[in-house]
Amino acid sequence: MYRTHLAGTLSAADVDQQVTLVGWVARRRDHGGVEFVDLRDASGVVQVVFRDSEAASAAHELRNEFCIEITGVVAQRPEGNENPELPTGWIEVTADSLTVLSEAAPLPFQIDEHIDVSEDVRYRHRYLDLRRPGAAAALRLRSRANHIAREVLIGDDFVEIETPTLTRSTPEGARDFLVPVRLQPGSWYALPQSPQLFKQLLMVAGFERYFQIARCYRDEDFRADRQPEFTQLDVEASFVTQEDVVDLAERITAGLWRELADYELPRPLPQLTWHEAMDRFGSDKPDLRFGQELTELTDHLRGTSFRVFSGAIEAGGYVGAVVMPGGASQTRRELDGWQDWAKARGAKGLAYVVLDAETGEPKGPVAKNLSEEHLAGLADAVGAKAGDAVFFAASADRREAQELLGAARLEIGRRCGLIDRDAWAFCWIVDAPMFEPTDEGGWSAVHHPFTSPNPEWIDKFESDPGNALTYSYDIVCNGNEIAGGSIRIHDRGVQSRVFDVLGLSHEDAQEKFGFLLEGLKYGAPPHGGIAFGWDRVCALLAKTDSIREVIAFPKTGAGQDPLTDAPTPITPEQRAEAGIDFVPETGPHEAED
RNA sequence: GGUCCCGUGGAGCAGUACGGAGUGCUCGCCGCCCUGUCAAGGCGGAGGUCGCGGGUUCAAAUCCCGUCGGGACCGCCA
């Protein structure tokens, strides 16, 4: 044992104790005759005093982040020299010996909670970044989150099972990462996008209750909340209803927020249907921390001569609005800025009417195009007051218009300071549609092709795929989807009818996931589950915007690991051995170079 | 695939709209001083191809074009 005590745990109770401590020089204050060193270990910091000893002269040579061992006596600090900012601020250790275990070169950046360093530099030297207690706390929190989830699940007799990470390409939405196979040139593994199919097979296997903290891989472009490899808390159970999974997921979520955010989840959480969420908030993951709900005006504005609106209405589409409180005081330039904002989102524009702050009279370019009658009831219809701005979206595609308004609502929330940063607002989004139209005129699965239609639709989803609803449920927290799941199809007949709607032939289905269909033959139990986006859950609990903060060694937006510099070119030998240049005989002969 | 922002000693910034000597700030680093500090203090010092490559100009950190890197967003991601 190197040490007798942990630096951060020393207190007045240890006064007069002889202690040996190890750790890093967090900071030193050299006064010539006396020197103070803040010694940091994983438990915290304590002040070490060097004075009148051999150790004291050696201490002058110390520099920040040297790794040292000291022996000394714990003492009460002299009257007036206590530091109430530190948990150990009432005591100090008077050192009588010092051993430098490891010197530190000058640092690429200062290890200091008070100083901002760019992410680039921090992650290149992440091992130094993580010496900052604040940065390390995010990973410690994640460890506790893992533990809390395991406690709930194991308490419910769930079995933690690992599934392969070298597997076959699965039929889900994202691009796969591929791994060449040396022993079978031309054949490749894929890294799993999720353990979806394996967990269903574990249900066929009779485990009844499975979970895993699973690494998943998707080869898509990145965002602040996406990494090429990410983690799900993956859960599946047999003989469960939607209510059972909802209850379990709420207990996991409640446990996390109770212990890590000191917040008692109001259970049961409110449930919105997918359509209700779209109608009211223009999003399938609404941020319920503020109001500004959308108002549908399709009926109110019927008969208008304004072509932007009438075109959408006559096409059976949607016209709606969202209110920006106080938005009438925006300059023309700011109002034009909203047009650019909408265009950047692929919309044609964002029509608006401002209500005069004094008279409430509707003004603006769009107001001129609307009749007296339509303008008259507008403010009441959308719940706007004098001085507000009303933004409109119209489209033959209801969802498209609603999503534009939903994005505008969020932007209004941000710009007008309507979002309480300390608030938590959870809800479930249930009854999502089964299918959405593809560009080619067919249908694709909104969730995934194994999601069960709900009882209302199970016998007739193919007659009206656009309106069919699923047994699905997502937890949304402050506008983030933190978990999503569904009751799965366990009946082969239903499954093949779903494939028919998706335009997937029997042969294609067999080719892509015949192993799952084969498994479903042998007495597959009814089952369902849910998966938490674990990085996002931890980021929310850590109160950070970026999931990178809760990942030990995250990648940059281009998928580069700033620490190892991966991915890197391979040697010609590796290339030859991996067999990646293998050209299939029947395939197009397009070998590069 | 598209849009926007950033790139200046080791870190973080200012300087760039309107071209005029690498100018400045905070911190760190090195040396000296200092016996109660705690984001210690004082004095002195070192350290920069202004991301890179072209172009315009008597003259470019500054203007133009291209490119690389980082960040954010749209598309994409059940």
Image: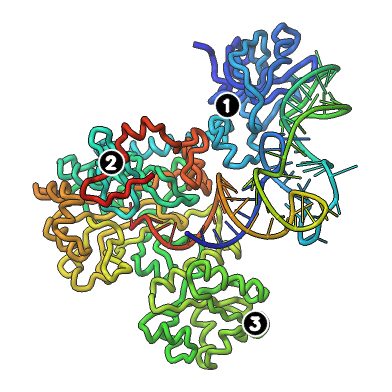
Estimate the x, y position of residue A161 in percent, counting from the top left. 26, 36
Secondary structure at numbered mark 3: loop
| Circle 1: residue type | Gly
Discs 3, 1 touching: Cβ within 8 Å = no
Q: Disc 1 is attached to a residue of which chain? A: A
Residue pointed to by mark 1: A44
Which quadrant is the C terminus of chain A positioned in?
top left
Looking at the image, is A92 positioned above or below residue A244? above
Taking depth in this image into account, of B37 and A460 the one nearest to the observer is A460
Closest to the observer, A580 or A282: A580
Q: Earlier in the sequence, mark 2 or mark 3?
A: 3
Q: Nearer the viewer, mark 1 or mark 2?
A: 2
Q: Secondary structure at mark 2?
A: loop
**Relative side of B72 to A80, left or right:** left
Answer whether labels 1 and 2 touch (C-beta < 8 Å). no
Q: Which amino acid, by three-letter code, is at mark 2?
A: Phe
Chain containing mark 3 = A
Please give the residue where the numbered disc 2 appears in the rendered image.
A582
Please tell me how crowded label 1 is: few (under 14), some (14-19), or many (20+) other residues with Cα within 10 Å: some
Instruction: Identify the amino acid type marked 3.
Output: Asp
Q: Find residue A126 and report its horizontal and vertical position in percent.
A: 54, 33
Viewer-nearest of discs 2 and 3: 2
Answer left or right for A167 relative to A518: right
Q: Earlier in the sequence, mark 1 or mark 2?
A: 1
Q: Which residue is mark 3?
A: A356
> Horizontal and vertical percent for residue B1?
47, 59
Residue at (48% x, 34% y) in the render: A140
Q: Residue A422: horizontal and vertical position, in percent?
A: 54, 52
Chain of the residue under the numbered disc 2 shown in the image: A
